Image (cartoon, grey):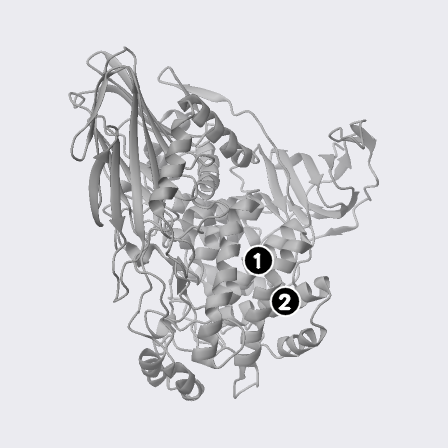
Amino acid sequence: MRRSAFIVVCGVVIVHITAARIWGQETPRLALWYDRPAKEWVEALPLGNGRLGAMVFGTPEEERLQLNESSAWAGGPYRNDNPKARHALPVVRQLIFDGKYTEAREMIDTTFITNIAHCMPYQTVGNLRISFPGHQKYTQYLRELDIDRSIATIRYDADGITYQREVFCSIPDQVIVVRLSASLPGNITFTASMDTPQQGTISTEEGNRIVLRGRGGTHQGVSGQIVFDALAEVHAVGGNVRANESTVVVTNADTATVYIAIGTNFRSYRDVGGNGRSIADRHLAGAVKKACAQLRYDHVTAYQKLFRRVTIDLGTSRAMKEPTDVRVSRFASRYDPQLVALYFQFGRYLLISCSQPGGQPANLQGLWNDMLDPPWGSKYTTNINTEMNYWPSESTNLSEMSEPLVQMVKELAESGRETARVMYGARGWVLHHNTDLWRATAPIDGAWGQWPTGGAWLCQQLWEKYLFSGDKEYLRSVYPAMKSASEFFDDVLVPEPIHGWLVVSPSASPENAPAIHRESSSAGTTMDNQIVFDLLTRTIRAAEILDVDTAFVRELKAKVDRLPPMQIGRFGQLQEWMFDWDSPADKHRHVSQLYGLYPSNQISPRQTPELCNAARTSLIHRGDVSTGWSMGWKVNLWARLLDGDHAYKLITDQLRLVTGSENGPSSGGTYANLFDAHPPFQIDGNFGCTAGIAEMLLQSHEDAIQILPALPDVWKEGSVGGLKTRGGFEVSIGWKGGKVTGITITSLLGGNCRIRAYDKLQPLGRYVLSSATSDNPNPFFQVPHIKKPLISDRAQLKSITLREIFVYDLDTEPGKIYRLVAATE
């Protein structure tokens, strides 16, 4: 049985974050802090405004800011379609249906893959270095990243003087700002320089500005066409500022500020005719006109408008008095709930910092990369990683942050049309398992990359955004991409010879292969079937909501009826392939067949208990410890299985301290700066785990808001505020002793709010509290009507003992806030 969720939220909760005193200094509770400088890149502190990124090392004698700009990629506009594929397609399909998987793989390698085999990599711009003479010996060192304000601070004593560096990456002013100060005037002396591993030149101008001009690299025969300009301008109060050939020197200043602006010639994935220097000049000119305090205020205000929408409190412990890396190293052996809350909010911080409206989406490393050829090219890997980057965007109240992803999907729907036509002879558009700044859509890497369902999965992200917002104009804007993706599968689905099911062929179960023959090329894999089901049914639903394409809807419904069902194999597992090829010994990082459990909602304890048990068996076979992003996914999967203790166990596995020297593929964790370790660094694990923590506390995928569905025993009491649900609701929850104490629900769209909870609920007296508005000046109004429990049921999942569930319907009005408490009797 399959279900697709109906429903649609927004809202703002602003709270004041209290401070804790560490070493006699005021340090915000929501801060990463350390008692030593960063020795390696994965210890540095990330700052970003969606377009510009900086990694701050905090070394007293030489500060290093490693710089990124989101459009600084290798290569230029190109295509990687292989026209041989269209003629080979029927032959490859027949080989797969005949069980000749090696022959199919060999033909795919020669007819589907081109010489541009890996797409273009995302690249670093370079470094700003600030050298301080005589600062080699220091005491009272503190390095912190305040994620409540998005500001990094370094503080230490040298020769009896306290020095401080404050660094932030302004969202409204589009510059990076470094503020340098000392406890006594006349003590700021340094040399500023820039360098880059790219082809480029470095010069100075106007007596206080360093100019770095570079060009992105040539890659796999595609010439580098991105030209970037990075400007660092130094201003000082007191003292002297002078420029040498390639450096700026400041002596005996009271304070100094370095402003960094970067621009490139990138206009769109088809156009590199812009002027990066004019962009950098414009942003720099605007920033230096402002006082530094005003720049900081504007930055913090813009940032907190997003970040402070959600609060979380999972309890307290003395562990917060220790440096962040120490807390991670000891997390598995002691109680530190605040580290989980910090890690959750750090994921939200990263999403705000690396994905802003009008910019590029978060890539495999988000925004931060110090290499020319980083692991996996730091591209957009669309067989889970890009999608996982945006799992927390709606549920944790950061809907705007997914706008760059939506724009990229619209662009891929354009570029993917040519791939669909040239390689498949099909209508619509297609994307395989990777893309880049240039929106390449053909398969890469080899036969295992011949997975044509990446675009269909991205369309699921488009639909989810609508479910949370209920914005029909938004749905109208993305419907063409959904429809076009459905047209592709309407054309390419073929009947398999045994059951006549319509399947995707050739394809693969991402990055895995069955032990029985070790060839990835396949047909009708479970993930493909689930994703295509979602794509077609959601396109149908979107067309019905918009009242368009009646004939096409009938056509798609006929195709949906012929899709393969999910199957349970001989070990009681949910099959990964169309045939029962799974092995309990398979510990692969991808658990692709469980897409139907999360992020989709085709499997659930209440609706499909047998499939749910099979999914649980598959999870147990795969094991818990894996790469970092895989463990982040599993937090969500165990939360959907309503097993909070197992989900928490995965969080514990995730919060294992990994050093930069660990680059093995099998065991992930967390670096000292809280970056996710695959290893090496991949940001999707951060976002996946953040989404998973939200999923443990609140779910809304089954036409109801489920309160504390997977609360682990260790979180005895706490609260969370400002989470969003499908259906147009914002929810805050308090609990104690594992039981709900109160719920606040803000309705933006009005209509019925169905609540599923483990506790009996009642209105707060006869009234609920609402914000006073112009049309409702009295902030109190009577509850429209909360019915007694409609249902008192027990979930059917055999493997998990669940408490009794009470289900309520609450009639709501737009803009009203409803407060409920657990019954005391």
| Residue drawn at x 27%, y 10% as measured from the top left | 184
Task: Identify the secondary structure beneath mark 1.
Answer: helix
Residue 793 drawn above or below residue 345: below
Left or right of 246, for residue 222 = right
**Can residue 430 be seen at all in this image of the molecule?**
no
First in residue order: circle 2 vs circle 1: 1
Name the residue type under label 1. Answer: Leu
Residue 197 location (% of width, % of height): 21, 48
Residue 250 location (% of width, % of height): 22, 22
Labelled disc at residue 462: 1
Which residue carries the number 2 mark? Answer: 539
Answer with the quarter of the image where residue 152 lies: top left
Q: Front-most of 145 and 472?
A: 472
Residue 422 location (% of width, % of height): 44, 79
Quarter containing the N terminus: bottom right
| Residue drawn at x 67%, y 52% as measured from the top left | 471
